[in-house]
Image (tube, helix red, strand yellow):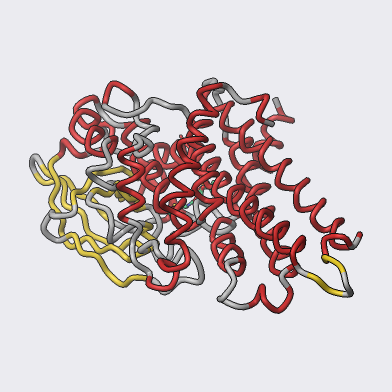
Amino acid sequence: MDELLSKENLDYRDRARQVAEKYVKPVAAELDRTGEYPWEVIKALQETRLMGMWVPKDYGGGGSGLLNLCIVVEEISRACGAIGCAYVVNALGSLPIVLGGTEAQKQKYLPDIAAGRKLIAFCLSEKNAGSDAGSLKTRAERDGDNYVISGDKKWTTNGAAASLYTVFATTNPERGTRGVTGFIVERETQGFELGKREDLMGIRCVPVNETHLRNVRVPAANLLGGAEGRGFKHAMMTLDVARPFVAAQGLGIAQGALDLALEYTKQRQQFGQSIASFQGIQFMLADMATQVEAARYLVYAAARAVDAGVKDVSKISAMSKVFATDTAMRVTTDAVQLFGGYGYCRDYPIEKFMRDAKITQIYEGTNQIQRMVIGRSLIRESAS
Ligand code: CAA
């Protein structure tokens, strides 16, 4: 695969690998235990200019494109899927501004995000609006030069770490998805409250919070894109670009688990020989490696399609997410199996990969929703 990557791609990979080796690997198990946020890693990513690499150069970012970002996420997640998530969810939070914000919004908010001075989270989901994102109930009403937002958001990833939030609310409930509007909300705004932190199976160092908006008053200048009713499209366009980097997170987790399984099976002696010398074990490793490589091709293809400006990337983006994250779950489960009883113990690093993999099949659209997106695209394409 390396021969298909450019010098720039390989340079991003080297930088990310150095951060992963020096800063991520040493803290992954400890932060999984304590639930503390990886601030030191975020600082290292800032110093290596990997924070905000997705932000256009005009606003102080790296202007790197999605393929480079996927490569970086893959490398970080290979060392720790949770830290990969803590990092890249900033891209999810800021993409609505990059893709749909006004010039003034870009100039005001993107430079701080690009420099890593401010982290940003994405507030779309609610208790009763998960897969059916368009049924959200958070309400925003115009009041003079302001909007007043009220409602409760769920699953705000990086919630307690962020200081900016892109919040989706309805400005016109009768219009369904066409009434949804995005807003940029600053953490200090009166009435914005962080709620319960979820006690999660994996990605345990990432604070995933409920967020509450109690008559939060934001200036009309913070209306995303400067017009009401564009929010659902902004959210969907964001997810089309974001899903390949969740796929890259799954890919990195799968590769990391495969690395550990290969090392362990070469060392582990049973019946007088290393278990890697048994054909049954080699077949398992071969299947894992083949799936990981196939996932890599699909993730990079989706990222390249986005970078090339392909008009409709929903299908390839959803395909990359389904395939790479299902691969992550299969490969990490097999890796635990290869470690035997030790794989089931927290003394060994492998069970964490399986726990961190699971969320990638669920967030940024469950893999059932991805299949729905793919199915709808197939039917549309066959009709035209
Ligand atoms: N790009 C641009 N516009 C799009 C679009 C896209 N990819 N997909 C849909 N739209 C537009 C449609 O064209 C339509 O526009 P018009 O009204 O002008 O016709 C409008 O949006 C509504 O489209 P649908 O009728 O297809 O909408 P739907 O209600 O059937 O929902 C869905 C479609 C794909 C199921 C969508 O709701 C969806 O993606 N759900 C999953 C939500 C999700 O991924 N949530 C994750 C949140 S982030 C997270 O996980 C937490 C985290 O922080 C990591």
Q: Nearer the viewer, residue 45 or 369?
A: 45
Above or below residue 327? Residue 301 is above
Above or below residue 310? Residue 362 is below
Q: Nearer the viewer, residue 209 or 366?
A: 209
Left-right relation of 198 to 283: left
Residue 268: image location, x then y, percent: 76, 68
Q: Nearer the viewer, residue 371 or 31?
A: 31
Q: Residue furthest left?
A: 144
What quarter of the picture does the C terminus occupy?
top right
What quarter of the picture does the N terminus occupy?
top right
Q: Residue at x 66, y 24 (%)?
A: 4
Count of residue discs: 0
Residue 188: image location, x then y, percent: 13, 55
Q: Is residue 170 visible?
A: no
Q: Residue furthest front?
A: 272
Residue 176: image location, x then y, percent: 40, 48
Left-right relation of 281 to 239: right
Q: Is residue 116 visible?
A: yes
Q: Nearer the viewer, residue 18 or 197?
A: 18
Determine the image quadrant of residue 351: bottom right
Q: Residue at x 79, y 55 (%)?
A: 285
Residue 94: image location, x then y, percent: 33, 40
Q: Residue at x 76, y 53 (%)?
A: 288
Q: Residue at x 29, y 35 (%)?
A: 114
Determine the image quadrant of residue 346: bottom right
